[in-house]
Amino acid sequence: MTITDETPLWVAAPALLAARTDDFFGRWRRALKTLDPEDIHDLRVSSRRLREGCVLFSPLYPDGLARVVRRVRKVTRLLGPLRNADEAVSFFRELSAALPEPCREGLGVLMDRQEALRNVEHRRLAKGLESFGAGKTNSAFVRAMARPAVFPQPHVAVDSFTRIGSFAAAALDGSLADLLPLVPAARDAGAAAAQHALRIAVKHYRYRIEILSFLMAAKGYGDIHATIKSYQDCLGIMHDLDVFADMVRHGGLPPEVECVILNAIAKRRGKSFAHFAELLGEHSFELIREEVRRAL
């Protein structure tokens, strides 16, 4: 089916959600087969995109696709601990090679703990994916998404005959309007909680942009997506570094070793924050909003 900006919402939404569902279950099958870290990561991202699609089009459905969202969220949460352990092992291994010998033993202890956790989570994930019941779940998703409200209903807050182009413009504007108030607090280098909140908002905005990218001019979308991804990557690195620093603080390491490691992490975080500040100066979210409007 070819969807254009003139396609009615009640036609476009099920088709776009079906594409996200196919991607999700395709990646689920691959992750179950390989249990490869990259495949697991891809499934986690796919699950988030599907959830964002459900939230985006939820006003068109009497139940808001709540059961679908809950089911997909369970998969996202199932995948999280293993990804976190993988990232921690990789980071501590790389950091160990860059620090003096006294630190390597302490980092080795942290890596051993994360390796043990990773093994536990690997087994839990294999069991969880196996018991997911993908066949029945897929059918349930398809049935739920194929039933948008075509005619007005009490619990449906959107006109199903709205053009998808108009709906997309309003939805993206709304997402950015929710994101903008989070920016001022995140400009403070030490405001980890504010930066984490902004990271989550940027991530949702990115997935929403990706779902609706077919409505945008190719070059315009490419530039916009690259900028949003830069924001997400930068904020994500800072968040990961905050998590790793917390692991070090609670790792029971000798104080002098802990201090050296935390200083190294803080230095890297400072570089990431400087990049974040550059992005805000060179490509503000207000500018992104205007570029999105022009691209649609």
Image (tube, rainbow, N blue to C red):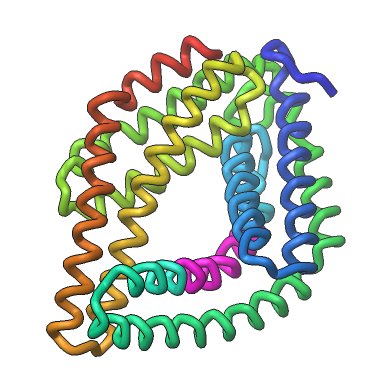
* Quadrant location of the C terminus in the rendered image: top right
Please tell me in which quadrant of the rendered image residue 255 appears: bottom left
Q: Position of residue 270 (x, y in %)?
A: 20, 51
Can residue 70 be seen?
Answer: no
Estimate the x, y position of residue 191 in percent, counting from the top left.
Answer: 19, 52
Which quadrant does the N terminus fall into? top right
Vertical relation: 243 (above or below) 63: below
Question: Which of 78/240 is in front?
Answer: 240
State the residue at coordinates (31%, 82%): 104
Q: Tell whether position 23 is magenta.
A: no
Q: Residue at x 60, y 58 (%)?
A: 41
Main structural element of the magenta stretch: helix, strand or loop? helix
Q: Is residue 168 left or right of residue 141?
A: left
Q: Which residues are magenta?
A: 70-87
Question: Where is residue 230 shown, x and y percent of the image?
Answer: 41, 38
Quarter-of-image position of residue 243: bottom left
Q: Taking 281 as reference, is 8 above or below it?
A: above
Give yes or no for residue 73 being in the magenta stretch. Answer: yes
Q: In the rendered image of this protein, does residue 254 appear above or below residue 32?
A: below
The residue that appears at 33% across and 57% down in the rendered structure is 239
* 211 and 39: which is toward the camera: 39
Residue drawn at the location 43% of the way across and 33% of the way down: 228
236 relative to 257 in the view: left or right: right
